[in-house]
Image: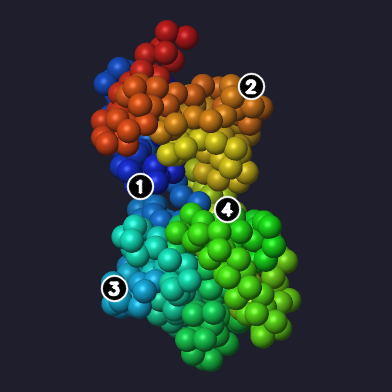
Amino acid sequence: MKIVVAPDKFAGTLTAPQAAAAMTQGWRRTRRADELVAHPMSDGGPGFLEVLQAAVHGRTVSVDTVDPLGRPIHAAVVLTESADGAVAYVESAQAVGLHLLTADERDPERTTSTGLTALLEAAVTPGVTQVVVGLGGSATNDGGQGLLESLPERVAQRLQTLDLVLASDVSNPLLGPNGASAVFAPQKGASREAVARLEGRMQRWVDERPDIAAVAGFAGAGAAGGLGAALLALGAHRRPGAHLVAEATRLAEQIETADLVITGEGAYDATSLRGKVVATVAGVASAAAVPCAVVAGRIDVGAREAAAHGIDEMLALTEVAGSEEAAQADAFRWAIETTARLARRWGAG
């Protein structure tokens, strides 16, 4: 049998390559004769660049920038050639990611998107015809104000002449009950009172900037604390990040000849069914008539609902480890154990 292992990251515990390695090791423990293909995935958030770099074999350019609190950090941009010219891949989380801050530092009333400016400057080198910006996992909620106010005019003009792509699984608008502040700011450390202040600040930003006002209601404008709106204002078009990664890494070609696909993430829940990695991988597998299984940190989706979305079997690390605390404490080990158990079940079936 040929098994394609294509998970997303397990947020806070495993990167996508680590998750793929653990799952591969677990399956091989039970079924040594099977062919295993590790194919880590991303939806545009943290790990986006690592996943793409391994697949497209691009050139990594080091960039000095700042984190969400303005402190100096090192980041990178990946440049790769295509038939239509060079493509630059940017991961916004390398400069604005929540993972760059300690729990005590998380405050979207203080954080800024300024750090993305240096990454975009590095991306618009001569010969580049497309810039792909992965959005997700941000610590910011400034509507891209930090980016736009620090972006040199020459860079802004250059971006507007390119194919600028916003890669994100988030389709939320900028404002309102489904907007960046209301939905995502609490995850970044904002209290209820802070959310109200952030929404007011975002409304003022929209009122001040006609270009932001023009795109505030677009799908994806609320991504990464409103960075989506800033990129849309610069002429970007949105693509679901997981779909983009699937194409760039030629996932469908691997799945065409597979007997089983295994995907997964930290929490398989209702949000997983709407354009994230698991849904995307399951869709590719379904199109190729290949069964698909999920190994996740925890599972909050019923079997019937999962089956309706192309999932044939599911198994959670929490089920095997005995608790969520145990699973998170040693996620690599329990990803191995869980996938080994899945392999035994599959063999028995």
Q: What label does residue 169 carry, if any?
A: 4
Give the answer, above or below, for where 34 lies relative to 255. above
Q: What label does residue 227 carry, if any?
A: none
Give the answer, above or below, for where 150 lies relative to 100. below
Mark 3 in CB contact with mark 4 (< 8 angstroms): no
**For mark 2, what is the residue?**
304
Q: What label does residue 12 carry, if any?
A: 1
Are there few (<14), some (14-19), or many (20+) residues within 10 Å of tag 4? many
- The answer for how far apart the CA atoms under marks 4 and 2 are is 24 Å
Q: What amino acid is at disc 4?
A: Asp
Callout 4: SS:
loop
Q: Quadrant of residue 334?
A: top left
Mark 4 in CB contact with mark 2 (< 8 angstroms): no
Give the residue drawn at x 34%, y 22%. Answer: 322
Give the residue drawn at x 32%, y 70%. Answer: 75
**For mark 3, what is the residue?**
73
- The answer for how far apart the CA atoms under marks 1 and 2 are is 28 Å
Q: Nearer the viewer, mark 4 or mark 1?
A: 1
Q: Quadrant of residue 28?
A: top left
Are there few (<14), some (14-19), or many (20+) residues within 10 Å of tag 2? few
